[in-house]
Image: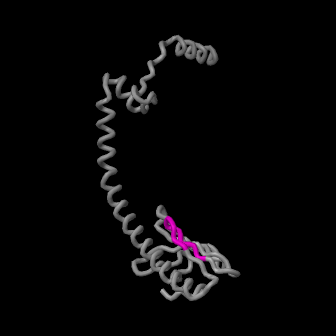
Amino acid sequence: MLLRQALSRTRQALRRPQARRITHREEGRKLPREMVAAMTADGDASSYFESMRSRVAASGATRAASSAAGDDYVALADEALDNILEKADELSDARDDVECELSSGVLTLKIAGTGTWVLNKQVPNRQLWLSSPLSGPCRYEYDGEKWTHTRDGSSLAELLERELGLIM
């Protein structure tokens, strides 16, 4: 009995005329389901666009606040990288076995015979990540005064002084 009912429903669904696909005229892409539903319900897309306007307006304030906070992070991270590069350049001038480079937010410091330190910005996490041949990977967050290690609370300046002799 249940099988007959299921087959009957399937046959009825197959006999119904297929809904016309509504596509974007210029790009040939399918429109969002919500827009198609709104267009079939009231003949145009006004209800869809109204709902999208309210969503955009609601998210606009949040996005602006996070963008401003992100800009602060980027400025602080860039300043830290520039300061470290300046000190690393001084070290490079004093020693022949040291090379340093800052490119696209990634600071690379190579010391022949010891290894390579890489310090880079992690914008989504609002952190600086350091890869060190001596202490391994470390993540630092700005606490309002200095860049502190996320696990042990030590500062980035302390690690750079201990491992490289850079006095920040």
Tell me, yes or no, whether the highlighted magenta stretch contains residue 137: no
Question: Magenta segment range?
Answer: 101-109
Instruction: Residue at 41% x, 73% y: name it.
Output: 76
Question: Which of the two residues, 168 or 5, is positioned nearer the viewer here?
Answer: 168
Label count reads: 0
Is 79 in front, or is 86? 86
Please state the horizontal and vertical placement of residue 126, each as a whole percent of the image.
46, 67
Is 108 magenta? The answer is yes
Identify which residue is drawn at 35% across, 25% down.
39
Quadrant where the N terminus lies? top right
Quarter where residue 110 is shown: bottom right
Image position, residue 164 (x, y; %): 59, 85
Q: Is residue 22 left or right of residue 114?
A: left
The way the protein has been coloured in the rendering is one colour
**Above or below: residue 166 compared with residue 149:** below
* Residue displayed at 58% across by 76% down: 109
Name the residue rendered at 48%, 16% in the picture: 18
Where residue 70 sits, quadrant-wise, is: bottom left
Residue 71 on image: x %, y %: 37, 65
